[in-house]
């Protein structure tokens, strides 16, 4: 690298010396004309005086020593002789491998020799401010101390008028800038080389600052790896790149729900092809068409100067406004080098050219299990957690590596507990904004149900726990296209224990339980409900969370006959929900006290339907016995009599809590009269008719 920099500096010095002579020759030619009163001091027309003045310029402004020595010995060389010698030295300095930066730039952008030298003229003022004086002298106007197209057309051989075209590389790729105020002719406008290009010519090749504020580099990870199922996507992209010309590469759309896997595929492709990957969100791109045009040209320029690729997070691209969507499509509608567009489900259309879409899925459960084994080999080689974690959580290889690295051998929790807790916490941030997280406290002992619904509840928990074995080890996954998750309906009157049953299952499985807040999911805006549901299900699948749809009939209601646009979009929401429920790989629990209000299509997709009956006297007695914690002071409670009150479990819990507060405020223990008083208030709240005599009889002390 140091050798190349030395060669590049040598070529640049020779080129600047050659350029200086070109300007001086034009200045000397123009100096023979009679000077005007506004012109700088004239160079007199005598040959000897002209040569003396020229020698002073050369000694003052030129770094090449040999021509200066010639001036001091005998007959001074002519300007043409000096220029011929400078041209020879410049050509000799260009014979390096790799070529100097200016030559590389000209080759890569397809610049003609005239355009290349025009760019050198524009950049010369950055390398030596003395060129400003020469530009003014050459143009016979000291105020015009800057390069112009007119000056370039005057001093270089084989001039081409198309150098001024906005479609030629100098202007199109923003290699130079044109300052053309008011009515200034284009040929007289000031030219300036772009700072990025000046640095490149000097040998400094770094990303343009204007792009570095928008495009962020993707951090390098030495441990980057992909599952075998994902390597196929990488091979497909690399093959496509190999058979495509640089001008015909269309964006590669990476389709999938896991951003980590899609990014890993893009990074692997870049490593294999020697590119550096940059990243940007679709919402960070400018909306204004003029700004997006400038950004596109600057990016195209960077792909010529640097081996780079771009990764665009476009999951929310459909959320953008019409103008934003138009601007983004404009950005991607031309050859832009290697670009990855990460989309969730549907490929996007950017131009009339066909796009290349690649499905990128998470590692399969078996691949995840192998990854867990590899990561835990040094931590817990005999652990049974790989199968359990792979069966319950759906993580990419990067997340698995991160979770394993977080294990602390000195922590008070065991390794298994730390792994499970960290995996479970992965989805909390994304799910907390869409659902209410419940803290499961109820256990199987707290649930009072007949044998049949209780058996179904235990089956649900068992299937969640053993699904990795059945689907992957026993081969059922090969014969099934969908339905890997479990959906269950808990049906029963209010207060019969639907929420508690969900808590019991979540507590038994040690999983997060989220009650869906319909106000955060359902939107009046078309398409928003589906997007919210998509984010909800995706986050739940990733971390194995249990989704609890309380009052499910509000969201899973029957589809109606289409009479207007509202009916049509409402049916679309239900159709999407049906499909997403079927594709969901976790546990979704629907709770309703209006089973008949659910769409019949959901019944086929439900693996379990658990009817929670209204508790009988036997069940109510158990509920009363468990409603008051053992720490609560009680006296002379008759649970047989209390069970005669026809109340649901939820009502009993409410009465027990209110009675405890009544006793605490009076400094008493919980007694039958206090419980009856609380029961009386609960029945009034429910608008339930009751007999005072019956209540007094229930609350009376038992006969001896």
Image: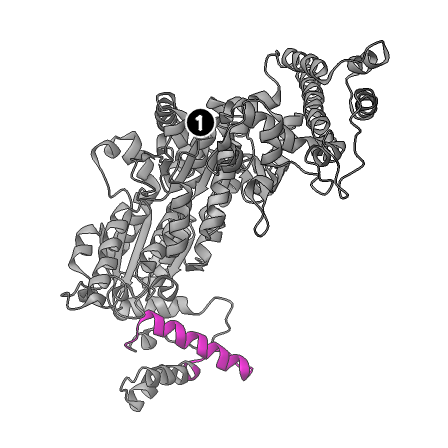
**Element at badge 1?**
helix
Is 688 inside the magenta-drawn segment?
no
Residue 411 can be seen in this image = no
Q: Quadrant of the N terminus?
A: top right
Q: Quadrant of residue 209?
A: top right
> Magenta stretch?
646-674
- Main SS of the magenta part reads helix
Residue 248 against residue 97 in the figure, above or below: below
Mark 1 highlights which residue? 269
Give the farthest residue toward the top: 74
10 Å crowding of disc 1: few (<14), some (14-19), many (20+): many
Query: Residue 3, how many percent across, how many down?
Result: 69, 14
For this rendering, which residue is in front, 641 or 488?
488
**In front of the other: 20 or 204:** 20
Left or right: where 78 falls relative to 420? right
- Residue shown at 50% from the left, 45% from the top: 421
List x then y, in percent, for residue 323.
40, 55
Quarter the C terminus occupies: bottom left
Identity of the residue drawn at 41% across and 47% down: 328
Q: Is any part of residue 132 visible from this angle?
A: yes
The part of the image, by quadrant, that contains residue 92 is top right
Name which residue lies at 68% across and 35% down. Answer: 139
């Amino acid at each position: 690298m140091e050798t190349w920099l030395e060669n590049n500096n040598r070529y640049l010095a020779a080129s600047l010396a050659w350029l200086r002579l070109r300007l001086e020759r034009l200045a000397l030619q123009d100096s023979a004309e009679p000077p005007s009163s506004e012109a700088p001091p004239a160079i007199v027309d005598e040959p000897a005086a002209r040569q003396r003045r020229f020698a002073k310029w050369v000694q003052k402004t030129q770094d090449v020593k040999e021509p200066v020595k010639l001036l001091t010995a005998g007959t001074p060389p002519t300007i043409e002789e000096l220029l011929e010698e400078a041209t020879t030295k410049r050509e000799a300095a260009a014979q390096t491998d790799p070529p100097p930066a200016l030559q590389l730039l000209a080759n890569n952008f397809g610049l003609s020799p005239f355009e290349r030298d025009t760019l050198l003229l524009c950049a010369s003022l950055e390398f030596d401010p003395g060129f400003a004086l020469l530009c003014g002298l050459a143009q016979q106007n000291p105020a015009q101390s800057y390069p112009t197209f007119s000056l370039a057309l005057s001093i270089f051989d084989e001039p081409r008028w198309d150098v001024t075209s906005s479609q030629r590389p100098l202007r199109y790729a923003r290699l130079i800038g044109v300052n053309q105020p008011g009515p200034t002719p284009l040929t007289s406008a000031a030219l300036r080389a772009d700072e990025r290009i000046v640095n490149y010519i000097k040998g400094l090749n770094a990303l343009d600052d204007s792009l570095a504020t928008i495009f962020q580099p993707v951090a390098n990870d030495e441990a980057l790896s992909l599952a075998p199922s994902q390597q196929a996507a990488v091979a497909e992209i690399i093959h496509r790149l190999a058979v495509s010309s640089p001008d015909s590469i269309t964006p590669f759309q990476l389709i999938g729900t896991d951003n980590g896997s899609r990014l890993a595929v893009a990074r692997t492709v870049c490593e294999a092809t020697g590119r550096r990957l940059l990243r940007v969100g679709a919402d960070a791109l400018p909306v204004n068409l003029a700004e997006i045009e400038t950004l596109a040209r600057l990016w195209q320029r960077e792909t010529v100067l640097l081996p780079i690729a771009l990764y665009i997070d476009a999951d929310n691209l459909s959320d953008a406004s019409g103008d934003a969507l138009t601007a983004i499509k404009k950005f991607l509608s031309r050859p832009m080098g290697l670009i990855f567009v990460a989309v969730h489900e549907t490929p996007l259309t950017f131009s009339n050219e066909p796009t290349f879409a690649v499905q990128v899925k998470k590692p399969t459960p078996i691949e995840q299990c192998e990854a867990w084994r590899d990561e835990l080999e040094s931590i817990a080689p005999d652990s049974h957690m790989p199968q359990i974690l792979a069966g319950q959580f759906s993580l990419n290889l990067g997340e698995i590596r991160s979770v394993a690295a977080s294990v602390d051998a000195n922590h008070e929790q065991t390794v298994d507990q730390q792994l499970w807790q960290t995996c479970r916490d992965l989805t909390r941030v994304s799910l907390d904004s869409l659902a209410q997280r419940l803290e499961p406290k109820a256990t199987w002992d707290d649930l009072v149900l007949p044998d049949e619904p209780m058996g179904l509840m235990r089956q649900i928990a068992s299937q969640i726990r053993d699904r990795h074995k059945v689907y992957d080890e026993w081969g059922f996954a090969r014969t099934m296209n969908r339905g890997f998750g479990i959906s269950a309906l808990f049906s029963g009157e209010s207060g019969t224990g639907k929420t508690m049953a969900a808590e019991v299952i979540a507590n038994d499985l040690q999983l997060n339980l989220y009650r869906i807040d319909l106000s955060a999911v359902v939107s009046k805006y078309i398409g928003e409900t589906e997007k919210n549901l998509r984010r909800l299900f995706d986050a739940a699948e990733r971390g194995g969370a249990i989704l609890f749809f309380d009052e499910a009939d509000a969201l899973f209601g029957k589809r109606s006959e289409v009479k207007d646009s509202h009916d049509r979009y409402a049916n679309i929401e239900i159709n999407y929900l049906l499909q997403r429920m079927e594709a969901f790989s976790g546990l979704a629990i629907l709770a309703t006290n209006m089973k008949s209000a659910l769409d019949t299509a959901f019944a086929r997709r439900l693996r379990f339907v658990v009817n929670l009956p209204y508790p009988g006297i036997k069940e109510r007695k158990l509920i009363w016995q468990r409603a008051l914690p053992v720490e609560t002071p009680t006296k002379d409670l008759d649970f047989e009599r209390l069970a005669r009150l026809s109340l649901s479990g939820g009502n009993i819990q409410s009465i027990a809590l209110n009675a405890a507060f009544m006793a605490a405020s009076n400094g008493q223990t919980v007694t039958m009269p206090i419980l009856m008083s609380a029961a009386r208030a609960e029945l009034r709240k429910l608008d339930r008719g009751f007999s005072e005599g019956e209540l007094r009889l229930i609350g009376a002390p038992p006969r001896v």
